[in-house]
Image: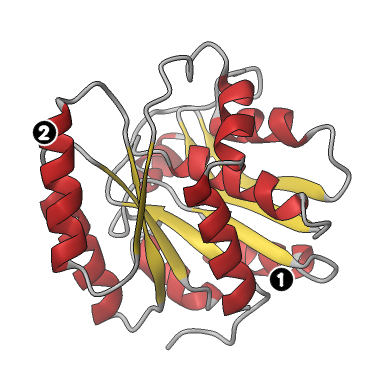
Amino acid sequence: MPDQRLQPGIFITGTDTNVGKTVVTAALGLALQQTGAKVGIMKPVETGTTPDNTDSDVRRLRNVFAPYRNVDVLNVSGFPEPVAPLEAARSARQVIDVDVILNACRERTVDRDYMLVEGIGGILVPLTETHDVRDLIGLLGLPCLIVGRTGLGSINHTRLTLMGLQEAGIPILGIVLNHMDITPKEQQASTVKLIRELSDVPVLGPLPFQPRMNSQWEDCIRTLANHSTIREVARMVQENN
């Protein structure tokens, strides 16, 4: 059974890995802090990262929010192997403790208006032998925002993610679609159209393709924070809480 909601906020998951979860988390965090709110951002688990890795998701989040006193970023567990969390923890001879993640989130939410928790991979990615990302979402008691691509395969991945969350009784705030590449416009339009048609939750976006994302990440995030899609998600988060 889901735990009692910890704090106003959302869990940001993806239909897969590398679909733009960190991009949406960062842009949404900036949009919310611009309202004067205190925002806590948490990525409980990250793999393929080391303390000196400047390209890690957590490092990118910390860099973009460094100028803002009303936003902080927390990571509980980081592992060097770029594999699924369960295997990454095993390789490091460690165990991901879900209770530690829950307690860290509870402590972080005491004096924050919104908590944004970013997952890793998709909802069935294993964290431990007995818990996957979907289990963590349920235990946190937060509604879920799904981030998905607009290219081929996204219709299937998005519908499977919706089914998995609904099966577990997890509230879904909506879906944000993200242009990740230069997929032909006709293909993107078809994907977006069918996802809207076949989903029973709000479908927002798509966010525009950002060709400078790799080289000018922070500038692109600031641009997206003012995009109508992110502004609409921020409004939904505020109204939902």
**Amino acid marked by disc 1:** Arg
Which numbered marker is on residue 186? 2
Query: Gap between marks 2 and 1, in whole Å?
Result: 45 Å
Q: Pick whichever, 166 or 54, lies toward us.
A: 166
Q: Quadrant of residue 7?
A: bottom right
Q: Pick whichever, 170 or 238, lies toward us.
A: 238
Q: Pick whichever, 6 or 235, lies toward us.
A: 235
Q: Is residue 110 found left or right of 44 in the rendered image?
A: right
Q: Is residue 182 found left or right of 42 in the rendered image?
A: left
Relative image position of residue 128 (x, y in whole percent): 39, 58
The residue where tag 1 is placed is: 106
**Amino acid marked by disc 2:** Glu
- Of circles 2 and 1, which is in front? 2
| Residue displayed at 27% across by 78% down | 166
Relative image position of residue 125 (x, y in whole percent): 31, 53
Q: Is residue 188 found left or right of 11 in the rendered image?
A: left
| Residue displayed at 65% across by 35% down | 61
Quarter of the image for the C terminus: give it.
bottom right
- For label 1, the crowd category at 10 Å Cα-Cα, with few meaning under 14, some 14 to 19 and many 20 or more, is some
Which numbered marker is on residue 229? none
